[in-house]
Image: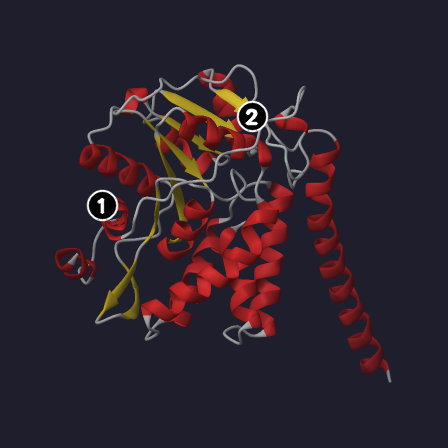
Amino acid sequence: MAVLRRLTQAKRSTSERSALAGEAAATAAEAGLHAEPEFEPAPAPEPAAEADASAAPATAKPGKAPRAPAGNHTPEPGDPRAAAFFDCDNTILRGAAIFYLGVGLFRRGFLTRRDIARFAWQQAWFRLHGAEDPDHISDAQQSALGIVAGKHTADLEAMCEEIFEEVVADKIWPGTRALVQMHLDAGQRVWLVTAAPLEVARIIARQLGMTGALGTVAEARDGHYTGRLVGDLLHGPAKAAAVRALARHERLDLDRCAAYSDSANDIPMLSLVGHPYVVNPDGALRRHARAQGWRVRDFRTGRKAARVGLPAAAALGVTAGAAAAAVALHRRRRRA
């Protein structure tokens, strides 16, 4: 890691930063396996008869586990060279992990009301459009790095643990949870791959019983964050670089692996594996999947899709209404 830290100081191209971010994420993921005892997930409860993951409620009822949708690739049991890679935001987690982190930090006094209002707008935009905005991602990155600079790594890890213990259980898509379990039941390694901070990614992966996580690595020295990243955000091509690096380290055969994502930004990662899936896809990814013949799983169908869109539409309406009221008040004051 010392070599990786030195490399971050030099000016590098986007592709070089992506490669560096991917290698850093893979190295950190492997280190996490050796540093912590292997997590044993609790056995999944028996699924109810006639259960259908695509129609499951946002929060699974106690005693019931959604089944993976029919027509999925059935993992080869006990294949040591096969694994599954899952994106996080809108694939496993409803909404964006960075937003939930922001809310938790606000409650603990690390963010202002202006910060949280901006993040709420970005979350509403994400949920309404079903796609990520690069400017929003960059903004969140800079805000997060500014917040953690100089902070002790152990303190942030403990805080993330508290925040996501409160969040994860109620924000998981049951259908995707069933797909995760399908690979775990086959004895495969299952990895979370996300642009969220590694500290957050590990907590979500652990709560789902996954093998580990590939996330954005923040540079740290002497147990404190420097306010810089190792390489770049684990986003787009950087995710593909991380999966490729981990496959090399773990001797995986990517043709026997599966990957799941909702975003066209993850086409590089999906294209690496022999079994790509798109889950709750944005428009661009849905079109690409149709052209490539990739499997599509959408857990937002019917009334659930309407529920996903309503909070975003409401937030947009509130924002627009507040802006209109402010303009009207300003005009009245000028006339007075």
**295 w.r.t. 230: above or below:** above
Residue found 31% across the figure and 22% down from its top: 78
Between the residue at mark 2 and the residue at mark 1, the CA separation in whole angstroms equals 30 Å
Give x and y (percent) for residue 260.
45, 31
**Left or right relative to 66: residue 84:** left
Give x and y (percent) for residue 298.
60, 28
Give x and y (percent) for residue 275.
39, 21
**71 w.r.t. 57: above or below:** above
Residue found 57% across the figure and 64% down from its top: 103
Q: Is residue 3 visible?
A: yes
**35 w.r.t. 302: above or below:** below
Image quadrant containing the N terminus: bottom left
**Left or right relative to 287: residue 242:** left
Question: Which residue sits furthest left?
Answer: 3
| Disc number placed over residue 153 in the picture, else none | none
Kindly indicate the quadrant of the structure image that contains residue 267: top left
Residue found 62% across the figure and 66% down from its top: 117
**323 w.r.t. 31: above or below:** below
Question: Mark 2 and 1 residues: CB-CB less than 8 Å, in contact?
Answer: no
**Along the viewing direction, whichever of 1 and 55 lies nearer the viewer:** 55
Residue found 50% across the figure and 44% down from its top: 89
Give x and y (percent) for residue 128.
65, 44
Residue topped by disc 2: 297
Q: Label 2: state its secondary structure.
A: strand
**Which circle's residue, 2 or 1, is located before the other in the chain?**
1
**Along the viewing direction, whichever of 176 and 302 lies nearer the viewer:** 176
Q: Label 1: state its secondary structure.
A: helix
Image quadrant containing the C terminus: bottom right
Residue type for callout 1: Glu
Residue type for callout 2: Arg
Residue topped by disc 1: 23
